[in-house]
Structure formats: structure tokens, C-alpha cells
Image: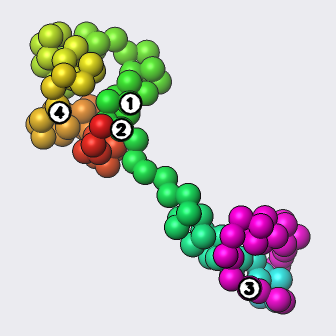
Amino acid sequence: MNIKPIRNDEDLREAFGRLELVYQALEGTTEADEMEILVTLIESYENKHYPISAADSIEAIKFRMEQQGLTQKDLEPFIGSSGRVSEILSRKRGLSLAMVKRLHEGLQIPYESLLSAA
């Protein structure tokens, strides 16, 4: 086992190449230990250099609408009048905490997505 830090994308490619070779290693073997270390190193490098942020709140709502085949009218119980729904979706008005709570409970949109800045 010759593990080294991942300092750049070339090191990352090499780590992935080695990971492919040891990924199915049996528990308790040297290769399984190497696999765990590589996974940790790869995750650390990717989190630092390629962070994934939470979805934009409006995009999260639109995504859920698309997933469930919802219309703007279907959002009225969670947001308010049709005018208010239109203002929210066009980013002319922000979501209130009460709206966030209702959208989370009613449509199971994660709080992290609903509370993110647009």
C-alpha cells in the first residue's frame, strides 16, 4: 500500500484508478484498508475543491412541481393567493418562514433548499 495525499486533479484520477482495483476487497484485508483510506482522501479533496451547495429555493420548488406534475394553483395552500405564488416564483417576493414550513411539510422539500439564498 502506497498512499499519498491528493494535491491536484491528476492525483485524484490516480486515486480513483487505484480505488477501482481495490473497491471489492474483502473486509479485513490490506486492500480493504487501502480502499477506506482512498475513499476518505477522495471525499476530502472533492469537498474542498468541488463543493456542492444546496439548491436555490425557487429552483427547488420548481423541481418539485415538475416531479409531481404540480401547477402554480397547486402551490396556493402552501404559499397563498395565485398572485403571491406568481411573485414568489418570479423572485419578486421572498418566502416567509411560514411558507417555508408549509412547503417543507406539504411537499417534502428540504429546509436546506428552501432557506438557501437565490
Dot 3 or dot 4: first in sequence order is 3
In the depicted view, which residue is nearer to us: 85 or 70?
85
Q: How many numbered badges does the structure rendering display?
A: 4
- Tell us which disc is closer to us: 1 or 3: 3
Q: For the residues labelled 2 and 1, say whether their Cβ atoms are less than 8 Å apart.
A: yes
User: Which stretch appears magenta?
Assistant: 1-26
- Tell us which disc is closer to us: 3 or 4: 3
In the depicted view, which residue is nearer to us: 15 or 67?
15
Q: Amino acid at mark 2?
A: Asp
- Secondary element at image label 2: loop
Residue drawn at x 68%, y 76% is 6
Q: Is residue 12 above or below residue 36?
A: above
x then y, percent, for residue 107: 32, 31
Q: Gap in Å between the C-alphas at discs 2 and 1?
A: 5 Å
In the depicted view, which residue is nearer to us: 15 or 104?
15
Q: Residue furthest right?
A: 21
Q: Amino acid at mark 3?
A: Lys
Q: Is residue 22 magenta?
A: yes
Dot 4 or dot 2: first in sequence order is 2
Residue bearing the label numbered 2: 56
Q: Gap in Å between the C-alphas at discs 3 and 4?
A: 47 Å
At label 1, counting other C-alpha atoms closer than 10 Å, the crowd grade (few under 14, some 14-19, many 20 or more) is: some
x then y, percent, for residue 93: 15, 26
- The quadrant holding residue 42 is bottom right
Mark linked to residue 95: 4
- The quadrant holding residue 70 is top left
Q: For the residues labelled 3 and 4, say whether their Cβ atoms are less than 8 Å apart.
A: no
Q: Gap in Å between the C-alphas at discs 1 and 4?
A: 13 Å
Q: Is residue 28 magenta?
A: no
Residue drawn at x 83%, y 83% is 31
Q: Gap in Å between the C-alphas at discs 4 and 2?
A: 12 Å
